[in-house]
Amino acid sequence: MVESTNGATDLSSEMEVDAFRRLFPLRFHERHLLESVRPDARPLGKARETSLALGAMASADGSALAKIGCTTMLAAIKMEVMTPAKETPDEGCIAIDFHMPAICSPIVRPGRPAEAAPVVSKQLSDTIISSGMLDLKELSLVSGKAAWMAYLDIYCLDADGALFDAALLAAVAAFSHLQIPVVSLNEEGRIVVFSKQNEGEKLKNKPVNEEKRKLKLRSIPFGLTCIIHKNYILADPIAEEESIMETLITIVLDSSYQLVSLYKPGGPALAYDSIIQDCIALSRQRVGELQTILNEAISDMEVD
């Protein structure tokens, strides 16, 4: 009888906490901040558990599935031959698109584009290009005539905060997994991509590249989003925290711990030098963690 009474009391207490969280979400989180802990038991500066799986999509030339907490991103790269621009005859191109289907979040309505999607797409494109991770000359096939266009599509499968961080990690991992297809010149002098269907034609055509190859990645960028609330800095926020504490700052460092970009889309809190330095310090720790996770995912793929 005593046990059932205790069980009923615990259930009632849980319901009261849940009701308080729904009615007064900011006060609920601030009570936890006083104890320097988050509702999910994380310290303020700790990111969520992160995982990576390369080769998640067999039909893509490069792909990866990244998870940061519940936030889940699927990145896929498809390579196509194009004619390079006259201004850059020895360079290829990349095109990045970020998708948020209705299944990823209750705030995304079917048939309507998510407001965050074009913002994240632009951030990703700017970051990958400005970081110097890719040498676009590696995508050249025949100077002035043919080069690779890398179409990178990132699909948000679950949007639970820090979307840019997870999308960037998925993009970097997909490029790490990318294998550039074998191509050759056909009888008309055009570049053709070899596939299983036309593998028998290999002897008739002049090879441009003998076998599939990987890109050499340098200065790999990693991102960490933080929330600034009063005197507190919360690393890697969930969607609930982002919705009630509106000042976000995203730091991107490369694998050499050099600053690539700093992004602060408004918000009531001011980003003082001391706050920025604290966020950069957290980002440096996070870069080490993410670099290790990426290296382990690459090693696992090579073993398989």
Image (cartoon, rainbow, N blue to C red):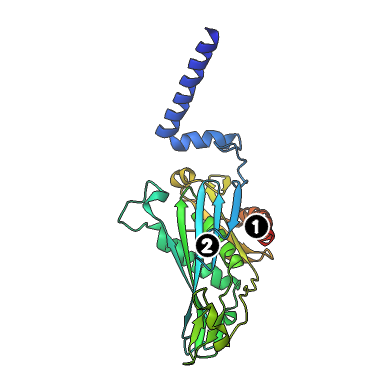
Kindly identify the amino acid type of the residue bearing the numbered disc 2: Ala
Residue 254, quarter of the rendered image: bottom right
The residue drawn where x is 55% and y is 46% is: 69
Mark found first going from the N terminus, 2 or 1: 2
Question: Which one is in front, 199 or 44?
Answer: 199
The residue drawn where x is 58% and y is 69% is: 178
The residue drawn where x is 41% and y is 34% is: 22
Residue reaching furthest to the front: 200
Q: Are marks 2 and 1 in contact (CB under 8 Å)?
A: no
Question: Which one is in front, 75 or 12?
Answer: 75
The residue indicated by pointer 2 is: 58
Kindly identify the amino acid type of the residue bearing the numbered disc 1: Ala
Give the SS element for disc 1: helix
Mark yes or no: residue 158 visible: yes
Question: Which one is in front, 186 or 225?
Answer: 186
Label 1 crowd (10 A; few <14 / some 14-19 / many >=20): many
The residue indicated by pointer 1 is: 297
Work out which quarter of the rendered image holds the C terminus and state it.
bottom right
- The CA span between labels 2 and 1 is 16 Å
